[in-house]
């Protein structure tokens, strides 16, 4: 069985899912590729199952695994009535993530103005830089355990709704006829993510 999975999901959730799955089905060979969702989308026909973030794949069966609300964190408070000007730290992700953040910043430019950008490769580096006071960072709830109670943060909201980074499982029509794929998908759908 071949699986392509976004880096965040493969770091946070996939180890326990695959651990349980391989214990239950030790004879199933698994080919796994992890990376950025955009890259996975380009190669999606090479895999039985793709787990991606952002937009679903239109030419596949796509099922929503979970919505991941976004928050802006900083070591400094978010003032109610004055402009916050701080560096913004961003991590390497696909365009849809950057579009979500840019769109939110555009609608909140009277409250928050990034004064410079720091671009880092990984979400974990982004978290560490924010925790050292180097600037603000937009992070999904799924990687924010421990940050919520220790750092000032605000939820990203537009028109009263949370801004979320959706996670999808995508596969070709008919692939569930393969018992090993069907069992893996069932394990995914039974997982509580957030």
Image (cartoon, grey):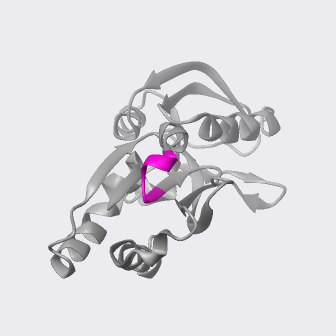
Quarter assignment of residue 143? bottom left
* Viewer-closest of 28 and 116: 28
| Residue at far right of view | 159
Q: How many marks?
A: 0
* Viewer-closest of 169 and 93: 169
The answer to whether one can see residue 136 in this image is: yes
* Viewer-closest of 13 and 21: 21
* Viewer-closest of 190 and 87: 190
Query: Residue at coordinates 35% horizontally, 40% vertically from top-left?
Result: 124
- Residue 116: % across, % down: 58, 17
Residue 104 in the magenta stretch? The answer is: no
Query: Residue at coordinates 43% horizontally, 82% vertically from top-left?
Result: 190
- Residue 137: % across, % down: 52, 37
Query: Residue at coordinates 34% horizontally, 56% vertically from top-left?
Result: 2
The vertical placement of 110 against 6, above or below, is above
- Residue 159: % across, % down: 84, 56
Answer left or right for 172 relative to 50.
Answer: right
| Residue at far top of view | 116
Instruction: Write the start and end of the magenta stretch as one range.
Output: 44-50
Residue 48 in the magenta stretch? The answer is: yes
The answer to whether one can see residue 144 in this image is: no
Quadrant of the image containing the N terminus: bottom left
Query: Residue at coordinates 79% horizontally, 33% vertically from top-left?
Result: 106
Quarter assignment of residue 173? bottom right
The vertical placement of 154 against 168, above or below, is above
- Residue 82: % across, % down: 74, 35
The vertical placement of 180 against 149, above or below, is below
């Amino acid at each position: 069985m071949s699986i392509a999975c976004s880096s965040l999901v493969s770091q946070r959730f996939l180890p326990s899912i695959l651990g349980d799955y391989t214990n239950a089905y030790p004879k199933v060979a698994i080919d796994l590729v992890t990376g950025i969702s955009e890259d996975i989308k380009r190669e999606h026909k090479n895999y039985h199952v793709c787990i991606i973030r952002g937009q679903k794949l239109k030419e596949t069966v796509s099922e929503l695994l979970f919505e991941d609300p976004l928050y802006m964190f900083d070591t400094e408070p978010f003032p109610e009535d004055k402009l916050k000007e701080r560096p913004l730290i961003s991590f390497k992700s696909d365009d849809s993530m950057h579009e979500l953040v840019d769109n939110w910043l555009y609608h909140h430019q009277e409250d928050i103005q990034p004064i410079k950008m720091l671009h880092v490769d990984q979400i974990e580096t982004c978290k560490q830089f924010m925790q050292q006071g180097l600037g603000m960072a937009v992070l999904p709830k799924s990687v924010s355990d421990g940050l919520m109670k220790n750092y000032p943060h605000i939820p990203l909201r537009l028109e009263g709704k949370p801004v979320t980074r959706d996670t999808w499982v995508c596969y070709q029509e008919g692939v569930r006829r393969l018992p090993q794929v069907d069992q893996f998908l069932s394990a995914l759908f039974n997982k509580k993510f957030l």
